[in-house]
Amino acid sequence: MNGLGNEILVVDLRGTSKVFAAGEVEAIASYPETHFDQMMVLHDARTPGTTAFMRIYNADGSEVAACGNGTRCVALSLASSTGAKEMTFETGAGLLAARVGGADRITVDMGEPNFDWQAIPLAEEFRDTRGIELQIGPIDDPILHSPSAVNVGNPHAVFWVEDVNVHDLGRFGPLLENHPIFPERANISLAQVVGRDRIILRTWERGVGLTRACGSAACAAAVCGARKKLVDRKVKVALPGGELEIEWTEAGRILMTGPAAFEREGLLA
């Protein structure tokens, strides 16, 4: 499947005891027919009332706690096969509720953002994570500097720039993802505010690289932008693969709405 053009592989292991090892994940990602940005693996539900327990893997075999685009794909897949319109998944980031209003409008409750430096996590204390001390380039004239940091199920750093296309994210992304300030690595985004209700975003995704779309990065940019009073609490985030609607509700929840699409189906053997 794909969520705004990125490659999502959905694997249903419910009814089995199978758990993928990191090496197996990398092997699956190495084949053109099954290459993915994220692999969403469904296991039998652990908590009563939930639809499934979901493990999420990057192409390098690393396991992550959240993937907004992938969750939309899973929700559409199950809605298409069962007719269900609402479902709840248990993940490493907690419970994620999804509602399917059609293939072009799937909403996922991504939970509450965490701005505490220890929860992101960062390697040293920053009392105000709206802008942490991190830069690329000369001290007196940095190319990128003072990103906002947040955890939205995974760690994110958002650099605010005038034009997302000016900077070579493919070059800086790996350096910043693996910077010592991020003990668990981080997703790195460039965000350009073009209005109170619109952000343009490019993302270097942890364990993946440059991506056409990252739902959690869109959530991170939206809440960090609202926290800095750059945008309103409901915005459209334009990524290379398309647009997502992000709302940071007054109750503190992040609602992400966007499309998903099927590409092909088969047996993984």
Image: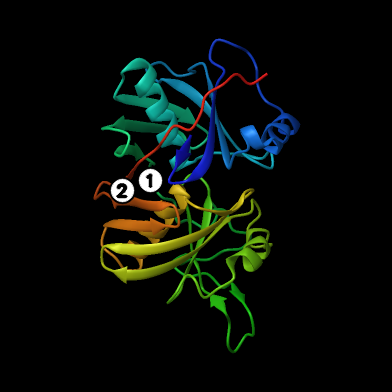
Instruction: Please tell me the numbered disc located at residue 54.
Output: none
Q: How many marks?
A: 2
**Residue shown at the point (63%, 21%) measured from the top left:** 268
Q: Secondary structure at mark 1?
A: loop
Q: Amino acid at mark 1?
A: Glu
Q: What colour-coding does the image apply?
A: rainbow
Other residues around mark 2 within 10 Å, as few (<14) / some (14–19) / many (≥20): few
Residue 38: name its quadrant: top right
**In the rendered image, the vertical position of residue 54 relative to residue 196, given as above or below:** above
**Residue shown at the point (64%, 62%) measured from the top left:** 181
**Residue shown at the point (41%, 15%) measured from the top left:** 48
Q: Earlier in the sequence, mark 2 or mark 1?
A: 1
Q: Which residue is mark 2?
A: 252
Q: Secondary structure at mark 2?
A: loop
| Residue 101, image x, y percentages | 26, 32
Report if the CB atoms under discs 2 and 1 are less than 8 Å apart.
Answer: yes
Instruction: Please tell me the numbered disc located at residue 112.
Output: 1
Residue 62: name its quadrant: top right
